[in-house]
Amino acid sequence: MTPRISELGAHVGQRVTVRGWVTHVRSSGKIAFAVLRDGTGIAQAVFVKSQVPGEVWERFGTLTLETSVSVTGEVRAEPRAPGGYELGVAALEVIGASPTDYPIQPKEHGIDFLLDHRHLWLRSARQRAIAAVRSELEQAVHDFFYERGFLRVDTPILTAAIGERSGLFSTEYFEEGTAYLAQTGQLYGEAAAAAFGKIYTFGPTFRAEKSKTRRHLTEFWMIEPEVAWYDSNDNMRLQEDFVSFLVARVLERRQAELKELERDVSKLETVKAPFPRINYTDAVAILQGKGSAVQWGDDLGAEDEALLVEGYDRPVFVTNYPKEAKAFYMKENPDDPRTVLCDDCLAPEGYGEIIGGSQREDDYDRIVQRIKDEGLPMDAYGWYLDLRKYGTFTHSGFGLGLERTVAWICGLQHIREVIAFPRMMYRLRP
Ligand code: 4AD
Ligand code: MG
């Protein structure tokens, strides 16, 4: 039997073979221990000199950090051992030796060094915990929308139309001219919403942002629902239900990982719908009262967002931003035409914007005007305008940035750790 370490509890008293990597060794001369990691857990292999063949004892002496091994022995419950189980070793096979210059040693390393060795850094307990929370969230995203009757639609990554204002990556596309890597799946999501009613996309998005901040990647994953007949209020209700669902799922199933990350879970337990809503114009007044230099018309920066959510125990919506601060597709606010029917959802504890959402401009002439005003190439939007020409419809949607959400839920300072191989302005390798 070759169980994974996480399955050892079902094999107490049995002889099994475990394969994994050595993370720690120590020996008293008569008894020796090797801690093994296999990605599902950790377990301790115990070598008793008087009970194992001489060659097994010798081989123990060759084990170094990250040697891959196959260990056969009897499983015992041992509450004091890391992981709670140990193997009374009968046989040991070295599968892959690991030279003693393994780059990541149990000591402090600088962040650039760690990122250069990201392919090895992933093996740490902390990185496994982050990856497990991320994976849990990805599954929860699909469960949430599936249970609510949404269709998942996969939108193209190579596109001709531009969705957002941020930087673009481009490439030559045969005889068709320039293709841009998608900054958003939204425009295609809108077409799909007219076809299928309730949809979401979940895919990688690309922004050539020359910003070196804690919350910007050049490649990140976004979840974008788009719903026919939803107005801006319906849209915010969906967002607060969605975010509460995601947080509850991680609390329910990933306590061990949150503990590994030393996350204060009391700060997550209060994340329940409804979320407070602050109008942009009020937000500017509040921020100015707190000493911010923000002026009406500006988008809110990270510092303003952190200042605004102070004292809240759950995310906060900021609604109705000025038209100039937001993308061309947002619907004009009939109560204040300087603004649009949109919201940003700001995570608590200073994490800032995790969602941008809006009701979409559904009037043909108005959206044509907005495309012109933004200086966007009209010919790339012919198909998009058809959605307003043939049976236009009230519709709304939003985009939740997966990495920012994982960083917040895990309580991490920087989003570079929440994706296996981060892409940033100065980082294309590994
Ligand atoms: O606010 P954004 O730009 O909105 C859109 O892209 C819309 N098309 C969404 C929609 O309505 N369907 O981006 C949405 C979210 C942000 O709130 C943020 O969480 C994340 O995407 N995001 C980034 N995450 C990491 N790195 C970046 N450079 C990001 N830019 C945006
Ligand atoms: Mg935004």
Image: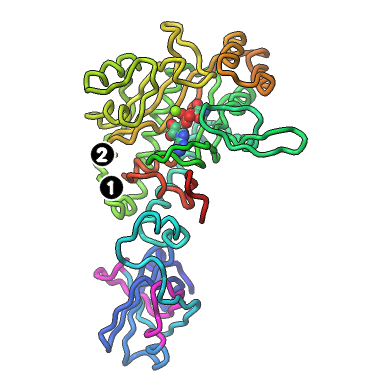
Counting from the top left corner in percent of width and height, residue 278 is at 32, 19
Q: Is 65 contained in the magenta span?
A: yes
Marks 2/1: CA distance?
Answer: 9 Å
Residue under the point 27% across and 15% down: 285
Q: Which residues are magenta?
A: 59-84
Q: Residue furthest right?
A: 175
Q: Is 399 contained in the magenta span?
A: no
Location of residue 295 (image quadrant): top left
Pointer 2: residues within 10 angstroms few (<14), some, or many (20+)? some
State the colouring used for the structure image: rainbow
Label pair 2/1, CB-CB below 8 angstroms:
yes
Per the rendering, the mark at residue 267 is: 2
Give the side of residue 64 with respect to residue 206, left or right.
left
Q: Callout 2, which amino acid?
A: Lys
Give the side of residue 131 with respect to residue 76, left or right.
right
Residue assigned mark 1: 263
Pointer 1: residues within 10 angstroms few (<14), some, or many (20+)? some
192 to 320, vertically: above or below: below
Q: Secondary structure at mark 1?
A: loop
Give the side of residue 64 with respect to residue 194, left or right.
left
163 to 71, vertically: above or below: above
Residue under the point 40% across and 76% down: 100
- Whether residue 17 is visible: no
Location of residue 325 (image quadrant): top left
Instruction: Identify which residue, 19 or 102, lies in the foreground.
Output: 102
Residue under the point 24% across and 29% down: 310
Q: Callout 1, which amino acid?
A: Arg
